[in-house]
Amino acid sequence: MSGLSAFPIAARWPAKHPDRLQLYSLPTPNGVKISIMLEETGLPYEAHRIDIGANESWTPEFLSLNPNGKIPAIIDPNGPGGAPLGLFESGAILLYLAEKTRMFLPADAARRYETIQWVFFQMAFIGPMFGQLGYFYKFAGREIADKRPLERYRDETRRLLGVLEGRLDGRRWIMGDEYTIADISMFGWVRNLIGFYEARELVDYDRLQHVPAWLERGLARPAVQRGLAIPPRQ
């Protein structure tokens, strides 16, 4: 396995192509950020399905790469200086891949940091708040008599959609005419909100104009469509 031999996760999920970047993931809103990015860049990679429903992300092998036990994670056998590099946290992986390929992150310093701030916005707000809404609206939260948590996350989700709506007013993508990792970081979460979480009416999604148009543009991209199904759930 050459450069992968130092990583215990590679023994449990062996690489057929050890010279390629290894992706350990599942097509969740966080997972698809990386599969979409890899499909967009064309960087050769190999995807390994991590069954989070079977707690595979909590196995010793997976925890050796990500001690936080969450997907996605990667190993790049051709990391900085040619040495293998393991990474977790989807935002960090997006930044790494953007810098490695010099794609989807502006070269201009000011625009680069402006893009990164929107990635951080997704990581700090969109993901956690939409995820909590999904829990309290669709899953176990329905069994909780006190509806204040659901109302809190509903209201916060509506507010965050309003932030996105304002940002996209007059812009094709988060950074205007330039498609970036900021867009890639958010597609899966907005899609999941109105799809899997079934919260379209709850958050008044159809009152928005710019967010739905932006999501439709994103989902029309062939690389996005491919990335949304990688790795296959079955």
Image (cartoon, helix red, strand yellow):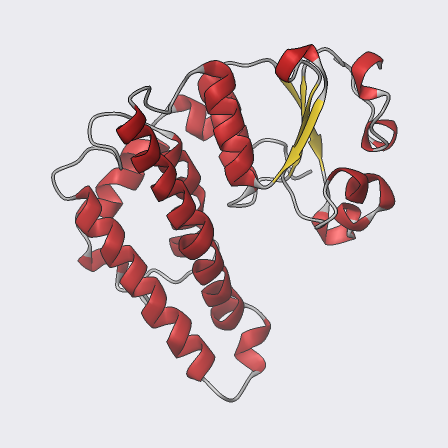
Residue visible at 42% across and 45% down in the picture = 120
Q: Quadrant of the N terminus?
A: top right
| Foreground pick, 190 / 138 | 190
- Based on the displayed image, in which of its 4 quarters is residue 90 positioned? top right
Residue 224 versus residue 202 in the image, above or below: above
Q: Nearer the viewer, residue 166 or 118?
A: 118
Q: Position of residue 30 (x, y in %)?
A: 53, 44
Q: Quadrant of the C terminus?
A: top right
Quadrant of the rendered image containing residue 141 = bottom right
Residue 43 vertical position relative to residue 25 in the rendered view, above or below: above
Q: Establish if 9 lies above or below 158.
A: above
Residue 149 x %, y %: 46, 79
Residue occupying the point 47% across, 17% down: 41
Residue 40, quarter of picture: top left
Residue found at x 82% / y 33%: 9
Q: Position of residue 29 (x, y in %)?
A: 51, 45
Please identify the residue farthest to the left as the structure is shown.
170
Left or right: residue 231 compared with residue 91: right
Q: Is residue 101 above or below residue 156?
A: above
Image label count? 0
Q: In the rendered view, does 213 fall on the left or right side of 154?
A: left
Is residue 57 in sight in this rendering? Answer: yes
* Residue closer to the observer: 193 or 2: 2
Question: Position of 217 compared to 188: left or right?
Answer: left
Q: Position of residue 220 (x, y in %)?
A: 33, 29
Is residue 227 visible to the viewer in this orientation of the structure? no
Q: Residue at x 65, y 12 (%)?
A: 81
Question: Observer-nearest residue: 101 or 215?
Answer: 101
